[in-house]
Amino acid sequence: MKLNQLTDIPDYVYEGYVWLSDNDKPIVYKDVKFKPNEIKQNPFIVEGLLWAKKEGISIHIRHTGRYLIHKYDMNASDLSKDIKQYLPHKIEGIKKLKFKPVWKPETDPLCEGMEVLKMKALVFIGFVYENIK
């Protein structure tokens, strides 16, 4: 689901990160609420990934001249299978970022009109934390 502005982001407790345009590394969220009213026009959010585990909601934020904000409801998904993990970039204390591919059936003319699964999104579903000794 597409959201129009930052204030449309639900008031949940999130895990994830927000990277502001004037920072060299992102702000990490670990079980805290996202406060869109604290984000000004400058600096703006270049990129953000937020996961509300309790609600099963993932928020993706990009800024390409304007905000592109998407909300994904992952409650119907099996989050124990087909999880992709990627190394973080400049995110301290995080070992990996977890994503769940979302596949949707589509009719494919190259397959005699049968339905095939096509990946529609790669949805952020939290972090794998580094073991701190």
Image (spheres, rainbow, N blue to C red):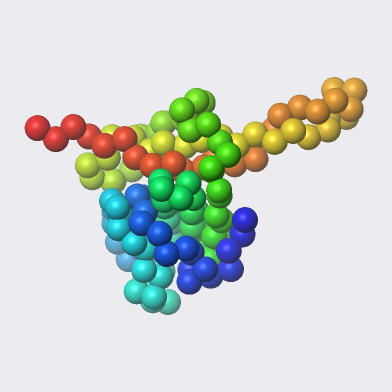
Q: Is residue 128 left or right of residue 4?
A: left
Spot the residue most to the left: 133
Question: From what the image shows, is residue 18 above or below residue 102?
Answer: below
Q: Please name whichever residue, 128 or 57, is drawn nearer the observer in this view of the structure.
A: 57
| Image location of residue 103, percent across then percent down | 65, 34
Give the total of numbered labels: 0
Question: From what the image shows, is residue 124 above or below residue 118?
Answer: below
| Image location of residue 27, percent across then percent down | 29, 57
Identified at 54% across, 43% down, the residue is: 74
Q: Please name whichever residue, 128 or 23, is drawn nearer the observer in this view of the structure.
A: 128
On the image, which quarter does residue 11 sit in? bottom left
Placement of the N terminus among the 4 image quadrants? bottom right
| Image location of residue 46, percent across then percent down | 43, 60
Identified at 48% across, 71% down, the residue is: 7
Q: Is residue 120 left or right of residue 55?
A: right
Q: Is residue 92 left or right of residue 96?
A: left
Do we see residue 98 in this rendering? yes
| Image location of residue 52, percent across then percent down | 41, 51
Q: Please name whichever residue, 103 or 76, is drawn nearer the observer in this view of the structure.
A: 76
Identified at 31% across, 35% down, the residue is: 128
Do we see residue 42 in this rendering? no
On the image, which quarter does residue 92 sit in? top left
Spot the residue most to the top: 111
Placement of the C terminus among the 4 image quadrants? top left
Question: From what the image shows, is residue 90 above or below residue 85?
Answer: below
Identified at 51% across, 26% down, the residue is: 82
Q: Please name whichever residue, 51 or 63, is drawn nearer the observer in this view of the structure.
A: 51
